[in-house]
Amino acid sequence: MELLPRIAKGLEEGDDELVRSLTGEALATGVSAADVLNNGLLAGMAVIGERFRLREIFLPDVLLAAKAMYAGLDVLRPRLADENVPPRAKIVIGSVRGDLHDIGKNLVGIMLKGAGFDVIDLGHDVPAETFVETAIASGATVVGMSALLTTTMPRMKDVVDLLRAREPSGRIRTIVGGAPVTAEFARTIGADGWAFDAGSAVARVTALLEAD
Amino acid sequence: VEGLRVRLARGDVLVGDGALGTLLMERGLPADRPPEWFALERPGVLEEIAGLYLEAGAELITTDTFGGSRMRLALHGLGDRCEAINRAAVLAVRRAVGGRAYVSASVGPSGRLLRPYGDTDPAEVRASFAEQIGYLASAGADLICIETMSDLAEAVEAVRAAKETAPGLPVMATMTFEATGRGYFTIMGNGIETAAAALTAAGADVVGSNCGTGIDAMVELAGVMVHATRLPIAIQPNAGLPETVDGRTVHRETPESMAGRAGELLARGVRIVGGCCGTTPAHVRALRRAVDGWVAAKGGGRPQP
């Protein structure tokens, strides 16, 4: 098998050592870092995301695949800079104020990082000011909010409103998710996007950015 | 009242209570405090809610200790109040129900991912559960209710912690499943039969499912679980899936539609029925009527599984 499909396959199997060594091997044989990223690591992660969305696999498999992804990225990172591959978009995520649930949000972070995004995870119980200030200061283009409680969902609107007041250009998009959060709710509060689960978050964020 | 173990062993049907978090929010839980804050600052609210569920016909009244392990409280800087919170929460329910209902002491997930998938040592999680369960037991709980678990390994640690720390108390362990194309699994990939078997082997006295799904899915998954354990089964569904109406999130399952399928749960061998997210004293009242009707039709109070 060619190297890149083997990297993708190794990632799908959560074999971080294999992915690390194959990534090094690919670079040594002259494959570009961008090619390894897109057709090796990200290709494997896309399969993982889709299989998780369909629940053919579960969280442990995703976590192991993400670990393999990071192993490959470690090897790749210096070469990506050399090749002037632009870093992917920066995304600020967190569970909103009053919400302590963060397993779902962590999962979204893993999937986004796995897809190559630069993720700043603010944790749980995050005040609206922190979301907005971090996004503006870091140059992020997307703010992702999670809420697992019907009682904390309204805090998402606080973030959307504050962001609109501080950054009226609309340069920073908002996306929301969490068990009780529906597409209709997202529209109601003026969020730019909504994702049903971590598996679909990557596709939704990508679509938001491509809408530019 | 009779000991809970006796009633479980006899195959009696017991009615659990409904959601707690939403009622606490309605009563002014500050946005930056965990629900366990009420145990410390406003235990009277916990008494009031316990009274509502008691009056609705619940026999198992849940304490406000879901996030009461030190590991979880530490997320709010309340780790050092672990003992005070767990004691106060048990005592509040006891004051409200006296001997008319059982105090079901809630133990929820640690919020950590265990090795090898996360960075938390399973022994550390067990110690955190054991500490909490020790306080719950010494404050007078009648039942340790390990609930909303998604990781079977963590649930097993919690059951073992309960068995070691409070060997005299019955332990109920319920997990949260979701529907997939190949049946019901937790987000960690634990199937119904695997979960029921492992929790039974770990020493649980009751196993089952709570949260994550509504009554329709619960009827289905209870039908699978009953074949995987000899233990009584507990089922506590959400009030359907959340929907948005006029910008507010609501759970649409009515008390009547939920209670309408309670008989099917009981016929499959379920022995504890209650509610989780979105359920109210009205749901519990409807479940109570349905259970009483089912038991009476079976010939009075002593149904055999």
Image (tube, rainbow, N blue to C red):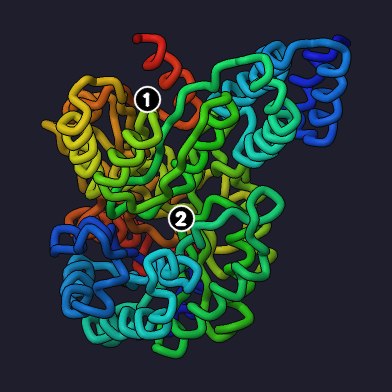
Residue at screen point 27% across, 50% down? A127
Q: Is residue A49 left or right of residue A191?
A: right
**Which residue carries the number 2 mark?**
B148
Query: Is A134 placed above or below B46 here?
Result: above
Q: Is residue B54 left or right of residue B146?
A: left
Q: Check the residue under mark 2 and report the chain it is in.
A: B
The amino acid type found where label 1 is placed reads: Thr
Where residue A52 appears, as percent x and y from the top left, is 58, 28
Q: CA distance from mark 2 to mark 1?
A: 35 Å
Residue at screen point 80% across, 23% down? A23
Q: Residues within 10 Å of mark 1 (few under 14, many from 20)?
A: some
Query: Is A178 placed above or below B32 here?
Result: above
Query: Is B265 placed above or below B304 here?
Result: above
Tell me the tag on residue A203: none
Where residue A22 appears, as percent x and y from the top left, is 84, 24
Residue at screen point 67% across, 58% down? B198
Q: Residues within 10 Å of mark 2 (few under 14, many from 20)?
A: many
The amino acid type found where label 2 is placed reads: Thr
Tell me the tag on residue A141: 1
